Amino acid sequence: MHSLLFTIRRAAGLFVAAVLTFLAPAAFAADEPAKPGPSWGLHGMLLFGGPDGLYAAHLPMFHAPHDRQVLLSLRLADPALDAQMRRTLGEHPTLWTLVPEQFELARLAPGAAQPLKRFRADIVEGHFERDGTPRHQGVMVEVLRVERYRVLKPALKPVREAHYRPVGAGSTWFLVKDIGARPDFDHVVAVRGPRKPVPIVLAVNGITQPPDEALRRRLPTGDTLLGTVYFDTADLK
């Protein structure tokens, strides 16, 4: 009798194990697209921030899969590394970038069916495609909030105004320029002050250098422009 019960239990256990083995790959793959879409790729990002938070800005181009301006509020899953990067980035404006694993950029769009909540990335001091130095590999990045998501439209008529919008918290602030029509430039500046900076609109024409001085003159009293974190024209020609 005991032998019969043992045989039945063993058979049931093998059946359950087989079912779990069959279902596991499907469950694991449920977070990934069945077929890569038009925004699938390796999406390098600017990494910036300070004591009050970390942010990442996708480095856009005017062609798929990179034709989206995306700005994220994030944290690093490793608390010690998160605190270290906040200290490092908060010391003075400096260029750091993220090299994420490949993913569908549209998953960061408002209302995405499968919103991207986390991804692994390498952290690079400098520009990851321009002689940057890898510092941390395979870091888990957690997306706290998508601050901005805009699909770029290169066919739009070029404008002669640059719109800067603030992102940040506490006394750590950044002005991030909206990307418009081709040709354009990408620009992020660091600001320190007791209050949130106001959006700034600058008249621009043929910009080849960061317009830091023009931005400095437009800041509210008490706010200090620390300098440019990132400026680029090459990717947006």
Image (spheres, rainbow, N blue to C red):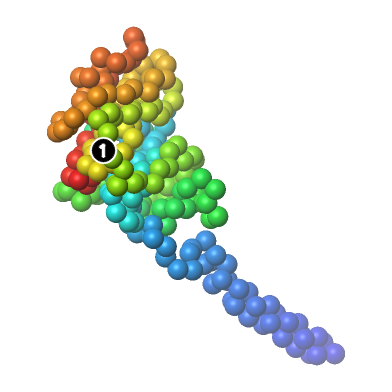
Q: Quadrant of residue 41?
A: bottom left
Q: Residue 43's spot in the image, x, y percent?
A: 33, 52
Relative to 145, 93 lies left or right: left
Q: Residue furthest top?
A: 221
Q: For label 1, count other residues whose C-alpha is less than 10 Å away and answer few (under 14), some (14-19) or many (20+).
A: few
Q: Residue furthest front?
A: 157
Q: Residue 85's spot in the image, x, y percent?
A: 34, 37
| Residue in the foreground of this view, choosing between 227 and 85 | 227
- At x 80%, y 90%, the residue is 4
Relative to 130, 159 lies left or right: right
Q: Residue 55's spot in the image, x, y percent?
A: 38, 37
Q: Is residue 237 visible?
A: yes
User: Which kind of residue does numbered mark 1 sit on?
Assistant: Pro
Q: What secondary structure is marked by label 1?
A: loop
Q: Quadrant of residue 158?
A: top left
Quarter that holds the C terminus: top left
From what the image shows, is residue 36 above or below residue 15? above
Quarter that holds the N terminus: bottom right
| Residue in the foreground of this view, choosing between 171 and 184 | 184
Q: Is residue 76 visible?
A: no
Relative to 60, 198 lies left or right: right
- At x 39%, y 20%, the residue is 198
| Residue in the foreground of this view, choosing between 32 and 17 | 32
- At x 46%, y 41%, the residue is 146
| Residue in the foreground of this view, choosing between 60 and 100 | 60
Q: Residue 24's spot in the image, x, y percent?
A: 57, 71
Q: Residue furthest right?
A: 1
- At x 53%, y 55%, the residue is 114
From what the image shows, is residue 27 above or below residue 145? below
Q: Which residue is disc 1 drawn over?
A: 158
